[in-house]
Amino acid sequence: MSLTSLLKVAAFTLCAATLSFSAQAQLKNTPMHANLPDNATTQQCLMCHQSYEAVAQKTAKMNPNPHSSHRGDQNCTNCHSVKGKPHFECNDCHSFNIKMKGE
């Protein structure tokens, strides 16, 4: 197994244990998120959150699914913030009745 694969497994294991509770509400307080810059890259997010498709599956029951956008895969920080308030970017153009935790 390559070093990159081992690091991904270790990061996922740490994140799964750390984020087993309301992740968005506790984002600032988790050890993994505390070490990320507020402008974390999507690649950094996907070290724990696996893939954009996996995230979209977790929000599949939402209508519309915010992670299945007509704009394709977006940067996580377009909506999510590690240390600040989230911003539901879809509502910059639309008027969906979706509130993000912490908004």
Image (cartoon, rainbow, N blue to C red):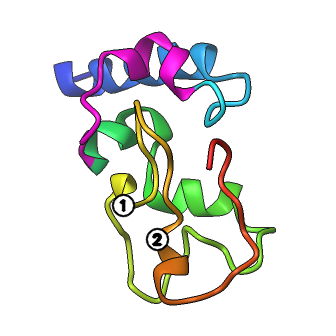
Please say whether residue 10 is visible from this viewpoint.
no
Query: Which residue matches tag 2?
Result: 89
Above or below residue 20? Residue 77 is below
Left or right, residue 97 beside residue 10: right
Above or below residue 29? Residue 56 is below
Q: Tag 2's secondary structure?
A: helix
Residue visible at 41% across and 23% down in the picture: 33
x and y percent of residue 87 in the render? Answer: 49, 58
Labels 2 and 1: the sequence-earlier one? 1
* Label 2, residues with CA under 10 Å away: few <14, some 14-19, many ≥20: few
Query: Which residue matches tag 1?
Result: 78
37 falls in the magenta region: yes
Residue type at the position of mark 2: Glu
Q: Nearer the viewer, residue 43 or 81?
A: 81
Q: Real-space Cα distance between discs 2 and 1?
A: 6 Å
Magenta range: 27-41
Q: Are dots 2 and 1 in contact, CB under 8 Å?
A: yes
Q: Nearer the viewer, residue 42 or 84?
A: 84
User: Looking at the image, which residue sits at the far left?
Assistant: 3
Residue visible at 69% across and 81% down in the picture: 96
Please say whether residue 67 is visible from this viewpoint.
yes
